[in-house]
DNA sequence: CGGCTCCCCTTGGAATGCAAGGGAAGGCAC
DNA sequence: GTGCCTTCCCTTGCATTCCAAGGGGAGCCG
């Protein structure tokens, strides 16, 4: 099953970014890679989309950023969740599930939560 | 399980409208009701959202409209799928499934297609 | 008649994704 | 060194599309 690239639906990027950071701080480039790999190359976050979104999330106090050095010895800005960001992530995941369920009902598709989530 | 109203994610309305018309022509008001009922009140399409969307879809030749009389004896504009609209519906349903799957992979949620779709 | 429901529409503003640009700096091949 | 690829950050302008908030007409019922 190979993957055509999909346009992002407006309103879903934030939760993807927040999720990318649930395991620890990442820099922007790594966030993109996380989302791409985790979705089996279906979702590609453009840089012109990512950085404004990161700024928005930082501005809303859902993320905090600090400069550091990447694994490749480059200057990079590392983002991490604030406690508020972590709460928001949990909330937004539920909203996504509800939305996907609702659309699924209309379209005739169902989705089930995973048996158990780690972490 | 009670239902909070959800904001529409931009980009998902068209497929919902197309799906509403798969069984036959409906007027705008009935399309809203279909989506609301079918989603168990989770999705409410505002009129200021619906009518421009209908116009867009008609303009793209995915829908055709004609005036008639509603079941309540009111003047109403009935929309129906064109053959192209029907093709597009099938395509957009697949895109939605792919998108929901991809987001699900990132967020840690899976969704399964229904055992068999009627029609 | 008054009020409710049904049914259509428009305008303005807000949000957010994409395309297309620019730039700096590390590492490697030559 | 030079050149090139990759990694990493950012901005601007545009297009799309949703919502809020309005307006209006017409059938039906008390």
Image (cartoon, coloured by chain):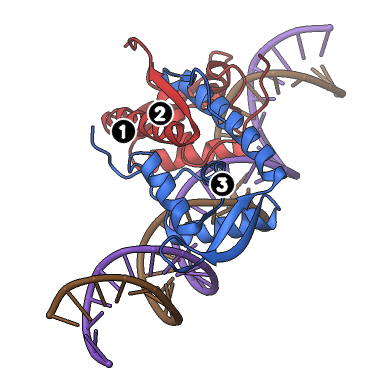
Chain colours: A blue, B red, C brown, D purple
Circle on res. B80: none
Query: Which chain contains the residue that carries disc 2?
Result: B
Q: Which marked residue is nearer to the observer: mark 2 or mark 3?
A: 3
Residue A55 location, x and y as percent?
Answer: 60, 60
| Label 3: element kind | loop
Q: Is residue B65 left or right of residue A88?
A: left
Q: Is residue B70 above or below residue A30?
A: above
Q: Mark 1 points at which residue?
A: B88
Q: Residue A76 versus residue A107: which sits nearer the camera?
A: A76
Q: In this view, does A7 lie above or below D27?
A: below
Q: Distance between the residues labelled 2 and 3?
A: 42 Å
Query: Which chain contains the residue that carries disc 1?
Result: B
Q: Name the residue under label 2.
A: B18
Residue A20 location, x and y as percent?
Answer: 51, 44
Q: How far apart are marks 2 and 1 (CA)?
A: 8 Å
Locate the C terminus of chain A and report the quarter of the image it occupies. top right
Question: Residue sitting at 49 percent across and 58 percent down?
Answer: A28
Q: Residue C12 versus residue A81: which sits nearer the camera?
A: A81
Count residues near mark 2 (Cα–Cα under 10 Å), then give few for <14, some for 14-19, many for 20+. Answer: many
Q: Are marks 2 and 1 in contact (CB under 8 Å)?
A: yes
Residue A4 location, x and y as percent?
Answer: 28, 42
Report the number of discs.
3
Mark yes or no: residue A7 visible.
no
Q: Is residue B75 left or right of residue A61?
A: left
Q: Name the residue under label 3.
A: A24
Mark yes or no: residue A76 visible.
yes
| Label 2: element kind | helix
Question: Residue sitting at 35 percent across and 34 percent down?
Answer: B95
């Amino acid at each position: 099953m190979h993957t055509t690239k999909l346009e992002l639906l407006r309103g879903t990027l934030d939760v993807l970014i927040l999720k990318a950071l649930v395991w620890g701080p990442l820099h922007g480039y790594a966030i993109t890679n996380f989302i791409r790999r985790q979705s089996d190359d279906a979702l590609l976050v453009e840089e012109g989309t990512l950085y404004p979104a990161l700024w928005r999330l930082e501005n809303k106090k859902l993320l905090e950023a600090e400069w550091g050095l990447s694994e490749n010895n480059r200057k990079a800005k590392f983002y991490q969740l604030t406690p508020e960001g972590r709460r928001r992530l949990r909330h937004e995941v539920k909203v996504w599930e509800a939305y996907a369920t609702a659309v699924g009902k209309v379209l005739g598709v169902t989705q089930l939560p995973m048996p158990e989530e780690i972490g």
